[in-house]
Image (tube, grey):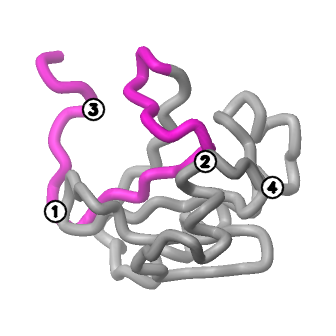
């Protein structure tokens, strides 16, 4: 655990979160600033800073993707959803513990604003 990492502290139970799905290796919780009717973050329990670090651990990467799919099914997103990973400051990554955003519950519009 990275003691200064917000998401590691959520995993440790030090900071509350609305958990919607949990496995031995992943945790999924509602985003506190949702960008869609359903906006859930899926993280590996083990700290990986970003997608590049996560890709070095194929088992953890597969677990995060499986958890994202389970969340989408559990949340009733059969009409469609997005799974987004932001990596690095230019992408808008704010917490440097890799996380997948599962977004859905309404038409989401274009991939990038202004394109």
**Mark closer to the observer (2, 4):** 2
Q: Which residues are magenta?
A: 89-115
**Are the residues tagged 4 and 3 within 8 Å (C-beta)?**
no
Give the spatial CA distance, label 3 vs label 2. Answer: 29 Å
Horizontal and vertical percent position of residue 56: 86, 35
Of pointers 4 and 3, the one earlier in the residue sequence: 4
Q: Residues within 10 Å of mark 4 (few under 14, many from 20)?
A: some
**Mark closer to the observer (3, 2):** 2
Give the spatial CA distance, label 2 vs label 4. Answer: 18 Å
Identify which residue is drawn at 27% across, 32% down: 111
Residue 94 magenta: yes
Q: Quadrant of the C terminus?
A: top left
Q: Is residue 79 above or below residue 114?
A: below
Pointer 1: what residue? Answer: 106
Left or right: residue 110 compared with residue 22:
left
Horizontal and vertical percent position of residue 62: 76, 56
Of pointers 4 and 1, the one earlier in the residue sequence: 4
Horizontal and vertical percent position of residue 32: 29, 62
Identify which residue is drawn at 42% across, 23% down: 91
Of pointers 3 and 2, the one earlier in the residue sequence: 2
Mark identifier at residue 60: 4
Q: Is residue 2 above or below residue 79?
A: above
Give the spatial CA distance, label 4 vs label 1. Answer: 29 Å
User: Which of 11/54 is in front?
Assistant: 11
Give the spatial CA distance, label 4 vs label 3. Answer: 26 Å
Of pointers 2 and 4, the one earlier in the residue sequence: 2
Which secondary structure, mark 1? loop
**Are the residues tagged 1 and 3 within 8 Å (C-beta)?**
no
Q: Residues within 10 Å of mark 3 (few under 14, many from 20)?
A: few
């Amino acid at each position: 655990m990275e003691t200064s990492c917000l998401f590691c502290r959520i995993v440790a139970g030090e900071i509350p979160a609305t958990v919607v799905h949990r496995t031995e290796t992943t945790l999924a919780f509602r985003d506190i600033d949702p960008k869609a009717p359903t906006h859930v973050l899926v993280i590996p329990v083990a700290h990986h800073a970003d997608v590049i670090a996560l890709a070095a651990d194929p088992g953890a990467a597969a677990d995060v993707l499986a958890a994202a799919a389970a969340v989408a099914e559990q949340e009733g997103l059969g009409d469609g959803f997005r799974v987004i990973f932001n990596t690095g400051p230019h992408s808008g990554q704010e917490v440097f513990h890799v996380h997948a955003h599962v977004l859905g519950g309404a038409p989401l519009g274009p991939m990038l604003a202004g394109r």
